[in-house]
Amino acid sequence: MTLDYLIIGAGPAGLQLAALLEADGKRDYVVLEAADAPGAFFARYPRHRQLISINKPHTGTDDPEINLRLDWNSLLSDDPALRFTSYTERYFPSADVMVQYLADFAAKTGVKVRYNTRVSRVSKVDGVFEVHADRLYTAKRVIVATGVSKTFEPDIPGFELAEGYDTFSTDPRDYLDQRVLIIGKGNSAFETADALMETTTLIHLAGPSSVRMAWRTHYVGHLRAVNNNFLDTYQLKSANAILDGNVKRIERDGDGYKVTFGFTRVDEVVKELHYDRVLACTGFRFDASIFDDTCRPELAVKGRFPAQNEEWESVNVPGLSFAGTLSQERDFKKSTNGFIHGFRYAVRALHKILERRYAETPWPAGKLDATPESMTEAIIGRVNRTSALWQQFGVLADVVTVAGADARYHDEVPVAYFERTGLFTADHDYEHAFVVTLEYGPEHDQVDPFDVTVSRVAQDVVGQAHDAAYLHPVVRYHREGQVIATHHLAENLENRWDRPLVHVRPLADFLARCLSGAEG
């Protein structure tokens, strides 16, 4: 039998898509997983076992949608027992809890997973995928949800001498009185440095890029405060240091290593530095080795991710899609598709995209009165509750379309997908479209949120809302494939955009002008 969908990988994304297909009950699918249980990545990583995805059971509300704004680990399910927040109260939980959660999710949703089934090769013959594993599977479409499963190895002579993040010891006593170089400036590098500070003689972190703080950029893959204790030891001159530049060579030097390093902030001064250990925390990449020449996907971002279009489909292999952390190629270091609290919504959108494309199922939509007041009420109600737009800022949108007296409200549509394909149906050839997102200001990462001398836009000044740096709703009016006008709702400390004169009336007036033709 040729399957409708074959999913490779039973991590969070593979389970999320499988659960949606299982609940839908319309398509033949299977998930192939090399390990003997789901979530194998989390059984090994992060090496020091503390997740940096927040978990907040106590929110002051019992609204499950709002609670998902502060729950970065749960997969999407109507079953309240499948909320990660019921597993632990730890704000930064152990990865072992995630392993248990994913096992429970797989069991309770009844997803069809074949464990201990490693895919060895994927081919495409006469438009059908052939997936070689414990036997030959054929499928109309393949979704890869394996994550970035291989460590990234930069082009550095002698890099093979470094101990990899996947193999080095995590026992601090193994580094007693040693000088340690860590290549990398991301969370894994700082997590490792923090764990080893008490036993090492000194630690240097090295890399060509600047250290960027997540609290400033709003990209949660940048350095998180929970991992930045090492910065204190550097700035307060406590033996450790951060080196800005390029590792040019690693060589054996007796029982240790000689590292040639070029400093970029001092006119490329080159020095030879000596260490007892060199650790590589250089991140991960996609492993494309299972694909033969008939369906090998093009790569992007220095070969670390598969290149994808607006539907999270390979740009050169039709029918080959990607889910989970691999989908971050579309919003790399801009939004949250690299993390569970982002890609769980992208997977749900992918399911709708696949159904629309291959089964001609319209994007789900609720009907509204085509009046500014009715549309305003719907938009205000959604932006004050939605977790999807909150987590996938600037990437997912609610879209209101209007054809005469017929208005329809579509939830969680990828912005780029809407701009490319629209949401037209046989019975709804709309003229007006309003795309609703939550976004930070265009220069939000240039603002120091802790500098009290930097002024902020007042919350109740409607005419200045477009200058806001903090997260706030943005409504863009589309007509004939073009953005005609844009309206910003004033930011609010408690993320409540429902003040009658500040949020509601200005939005209704904007919608009225657009519908009447006064805008644009």
Image: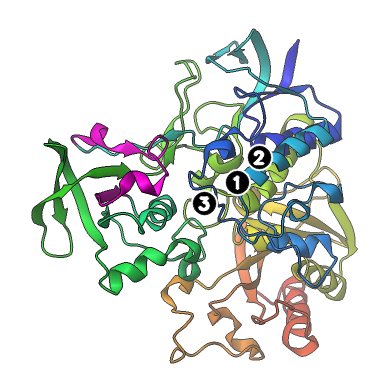
Q: Are marks 2 and 1 in contact (CB under 8 Å)?
A: yes
Camera-side mark, 3 or 2: 2
Q: Are marks 3 and 2 in contact (CB under 8 Å)?
A: no
Q: Position of residue 224 (x, y in %)?
A: 48, 62
Q: Residues within 10 Å of mark 1 (few under 14, many from 20)?
A: many
Q: Residues within 10 Å of mark 2 (few under 14, many from 20)?
A: many
State the residue in front, 508 or 209: 209
Question: Is 129 one of the magenta-colored residues?
Answer: no
What secondary structure is found at the residue carrying circle 3? helix
The residue sitting at 20% across, 50% down in the picture is 246
The residue sitting at 80% across, 47% down in the picture is 82
Q: Residues within 10 Å of mark 3 (few under 14, many from 20)?
A: some
In the image, residue 123 sits, relative to residue 248, either above or below, namely above
State the residue in front, 198 or 236: 198
Relative horizontal placement of residue 67, taking residue 457 as reference (left or right):
right
In the image, residue 74 sits, relative to residue 296, either above or below, namely below
Q: Does any portion of residue 309 appear in the rendered image?
A: no
Q: Which residue is mark 2?
A: 99
Between marks 1 and 3, how big is the CA–CA gap?
Answer: 25 Å
Q: Which residue is mark 3?
A: 331
Relative horizontal placement of residue 247, taking residue 354 as reference (left or right):
left
Q: Position of residue 382 (x, y in %)?
A: 79, 66
Q: Position of residue 503 (x, y in %)?
A: 74, 82
Between marks 3 and 2, how big is the CA–CA gap?
Answer: 27 Å
